């Protein structure tokens, strides 16, 4: 391409060095003592505006239209460097051509270019988006060079990008020539107990101090496609502000979503930034998010997607020792269907002995009611009372029925929260180590048992019908699900929050600790890990994206 060099030049010191005096916005080259201004001089272009929060720069030619940007000179502190991004990903771009004096960037077929800043250790410290207006080819081309965050027109009349165009990387992030990798920081908030409502919860805060990290998003430019024309087979498309939410049935491959009238399938396992036209033909950047809801999550009736221990509770088990003693294990169903909801309750399971039907109850244990995503292999009350029983006198020791639970089902979406409509009836027990409380949790899990995100709450006092929303914490476990003696899968470890999601674990329990069935002979009810007849009633459950 022929270079176009003009007399007009502009110094962009503030383009890549952010307020050295502000400790919340440290300089992008912290290892260097910045004594001289870094300068990037362009030929024939000027800076119209610079947004440090969005990392957005608007430029325009000083005299007539130019079909290229030319780097006249470049001065940087230390061995830091600038690169053109090799793709449209504003979060984690691949590196393209290094910016040096004489570099030419075409402006003929696009209205933006991404610039990646690396520090002296080759860490990504900022991704800036430089935008400009393309010349109007005719009077009807009103959609180019406008932007709308939703349905309005930008007052500046120039191209906008969403707030997702933010810097990435930081301490621990690294990049090598030809590609970059940024570390993820999980969010967290302290879980606690509310004396007013008797509720414990843990979720990720959306305050300025922390954020929900549902995964990095990619970006692509789609010109001429209207929001109103977007559709998906066997699903729905909903536009709210700058978010396009695509909901499809459970089991749909989110890595290959065909969003009409776009060409080709899109990988929507993580949010993707795209540009569309609104109803007024304003071009805007939108975050496209795909999600699914879990089968049977309205709780109008039981669904095979979910497992329960209640069927085993309701099935009597027997065992014979020395051809004489007949042991009987008995409880009752502790899940009931109410037409529009399901109720779980904590019940006693007994073990008695005798000959024929002359059975004398000899010991009592308490088991919680559980409804969870996965499978349960226990078949009768014998498996509840003593999960490891095979022969001989049944043990009065604790029985951990979580050993027979298989947790989770395949899942690849990245919800940011969940809601559930429920009520809870509290019946106290006397254990100080394992007090009665309910438990509701969601865990997103990746390969190798890495926990990507968690969200949970519990109640330690009766709660009338209400709806709760719990934010998911990516890369954090503020409730302590992995360390709190709850019924969770074995071998899980907390991840960074940036892993791909491969499974979802969801648990509803009337007694948070009563997956360990405990008690024993008469006088040992103080060992119950829950309160008898405590109950949790469930209505609608929904994942939020």
Image (cartoon, rainbow, N blue to C red):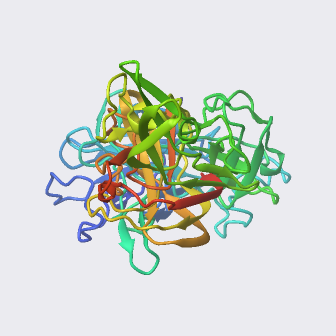
Residue positioned 39% across, 43% down in the render: 116
Q: On the image, which quarter does residue 53 sit in?
A: bottom left
Residue 483, position in %: x, y? 28, 48
Q: On the image, which quarter does residue 162 sit in?
A: bottom right
> 36 left or right of 253?
left
> 38 left or right of 126?
left
Residue positioned 67% across, 61% down in the render: 241
Residue 191 in view here? yes
Given residues 413 and 318, the one toward you in this image is 318
Quadrant in which the N terminus is drawn: top right
Residue 487, position in %: x, y? 40, 44
Residue positioned 68% across, 58% down in the render: 147
Residue 254, position in %: x, y? 63, 33
Residue 129, position in %: x, y? 49, 50
Given residues 356 and 372, the one toward you in this image is 356
Of all residues, the one furthest to the bottom in this rendering is: 196
Q: On the image, which quarter does residue 33 sit in?
A: bottom left
Of all residues, the one furthest to the top in this rendering is: 323
Given residues 398 and 276, the one toward you in this image is 398
Examine the rendered structure and indicate whether residue 24 appears above or below residue 265: below
Residue positioned 51% across, 39% down in the render: 504
Examine the rendered structure and indicate whether residue 255 appears above or below residue 241: above
């Amino acid at each position: 391409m022929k270079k176009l060099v003009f007399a007009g030049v502009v110094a962009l010191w503030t383009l890549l060095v952010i307020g050295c005096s502000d400790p919340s916005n440290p300089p992008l080259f912290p290892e260097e003592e910045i004594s001289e201004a870094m300068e990037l001089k362009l030929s024939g272009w000027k800076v119209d505006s610079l947004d440090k929060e969005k990392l957005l720069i608007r430029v325009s030619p000083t005299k007539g239209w130019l079909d290229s940007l030319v780097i006249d000179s470049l001065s940087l502190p230390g061995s830091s460097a600038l690169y053109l991004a090799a793709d449209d990903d504003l979060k984690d771009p691949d590196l393209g051509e290094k910016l040096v004096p004489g570099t030419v960037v075409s402006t003929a077929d696009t209205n933006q270019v991404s610039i990646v800043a690396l520090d002296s250790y080759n860490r990504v410290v900022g991704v800036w988006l430089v935008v400009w207006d393309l010349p109007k080819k005719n009077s009807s081309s009103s959609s180019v060079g406008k932007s709308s965050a939703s349905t309005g027109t930008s007052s500046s009349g120039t191209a906008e990008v969403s707030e997702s165009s933010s810097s990435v990387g930081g301490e621990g992030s690294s990049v090598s020539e030809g590609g970059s990798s940024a570390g993820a920081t999980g969010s967290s908030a302290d879980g606690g107990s509310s004396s007013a409502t008797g509720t414990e919860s843990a979720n990720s805060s959306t305050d300025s101090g922390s954020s929900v990290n549902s995964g990095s998003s990619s970006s692509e430019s789609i010109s001429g496609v209207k929001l109103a024309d977007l559709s998906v087979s066997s699903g729905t498309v909903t536009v709210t502000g700058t978010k396009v939410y695509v909901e499809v049935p459970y089991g749909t491959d989110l890595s290959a979503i065909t969003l009409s009238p776009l060409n080709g399938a899109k990988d929507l396992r993580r949010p993707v930034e795209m540009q569309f036209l609104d109803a007024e033909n304003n071009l805007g950047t939108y975050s496209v998010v795909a999600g699914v809801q879990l089968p049977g999550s309205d709780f109008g009736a039981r669904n095979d997607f979910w497992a329960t221990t209640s069927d085993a509770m309701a099935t009597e088990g027997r065992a014979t020792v020395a051809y004489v003693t007949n042991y009987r294990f008995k409880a009752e169903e502790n899940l009931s269907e109410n037409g529009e909801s399901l109720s779980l309750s904590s019940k006693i399971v007994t073990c008695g002995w005798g000959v024929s039907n002359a059975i004398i109850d000899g010991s009592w244990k308490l088991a919680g009611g559980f409804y969870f995503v996965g499978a349960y292999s226990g078949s009768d009350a014998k498996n509840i009372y003593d999960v490891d029983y095979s022969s001989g006198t049944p043990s009065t020791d604790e029985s951990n029925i979580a050993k027979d639970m298989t947790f989770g089902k395949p899942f690849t979406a990245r919800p940011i929260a969940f809601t559930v409509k429920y009520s809870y009836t509290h019946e106290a027990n006397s254990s100080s180590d394992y007090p009665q409380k309910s438990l509701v949790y969601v865990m997103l899990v990746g390969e190798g048992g890495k926990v990507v995100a968690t969200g949970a709450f519990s109640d330690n006092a009766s709660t009338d019908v209400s709806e709760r929303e719990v934010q998911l914490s990516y890369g954090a476990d503020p409730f302590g699900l992995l360390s709190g003696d709850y019924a969770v899968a074995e071998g899980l470890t907390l991840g960074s929050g940036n892993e791909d999601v491969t499974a979802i674990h969801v648990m509803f329990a009337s007694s948070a600790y009563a997956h360990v069935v405990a008690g024993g002979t008469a006088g040992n009810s103080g060992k119950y890990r829950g309160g008898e007849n405590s109950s949790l009633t469930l209505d609608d459950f929904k994942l939020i994206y």
